[in-house]
Image: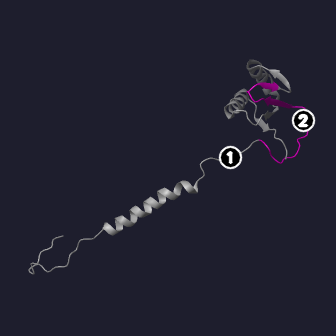
Amino acid sequence: MTFDNDDSNSEPLSEINIIPFVDVMLVLLILFIITAPLLTPNAVKIELPKASSQKISDKPNKIVLAIDKKGGLFWNDKSITEQEFHLRLKQAAPKNPELHLRAHKETQYQRIAEIMSAAQNAGINRLGFITDPR
């Protein structure tokens, strides 16, 4: 864009002025950057495991595996070691039992995931969680 007073070239200027467009886009970008974190919460606060559920009738082919706060295992309310747990899973798998997990609410999820993976690897297909009814 030139500013000369030469009347010999009296054609209209054909350049697009994009500065106002860029200004508007930058303002919109800044507004989006500021408001986006407000739309999504930083952390989900949950307390597990309470749920409304019906009591399951006792079936003869079920295993209740309790996991305490520190990750200790209890097979039908009897304390067992990690090796015993894997051995019992392999022995029980051909009978196609239901594995019911009863974990303390402060048990680490990693520990529960390890138990679930071990059960699946042993061939147990049915798994349930025992919760505290409200």
| Element type where label 2 sits in the image | loop
Any magenta on residue 28? Answer: no
- Marks 1 and 2, Cα distance to the nearest angstrom? 35 Å
Q: Quadrant of the N terminus?
A: bottom left
Q: Count residues near mark 2 (Cα–Cα under 10 Å), then give few for <14, some for 14-19, many for 20+.
A: few
Q: Residue at point 60% right, 52% down?
A: 41
Q: Residue at x 83, y 28 (%)?
A: 95
Query: Which residue is more in the foreground, 27 or 112?
Result: 27
Residue 111 in percent (x, y) is at: 69, 30
Q: Nearer the viewer, residue 11 or 104?
A: 104
Which residue is the site of mark 1? 45
Q: Would you identify the image quadrant in which residue 59 lies?
A: top right
Three-letter code for the amino acid on which mark 1 is drawn: Lys
Percent coordinates x, y for residue 79 in the rendering: 82, 22
Q: Secondary structure at mark 1?
A: loop
Measured from the top left, where is residue 37 in percent x and y? 54, 54
Give the extent of the magenta segment.
Answer: 49-74
Please report whichever mark, 1 or 2, sits nearer to the chain's N-terminal start. Answer: 1
Q: Which numbered tag is attached to residue 59? A: 2
- The residue lying at 34 percent from left, 69 percent from top is 20
In the image, residue 54 sits, relative to residue 60, either above or below, namely below
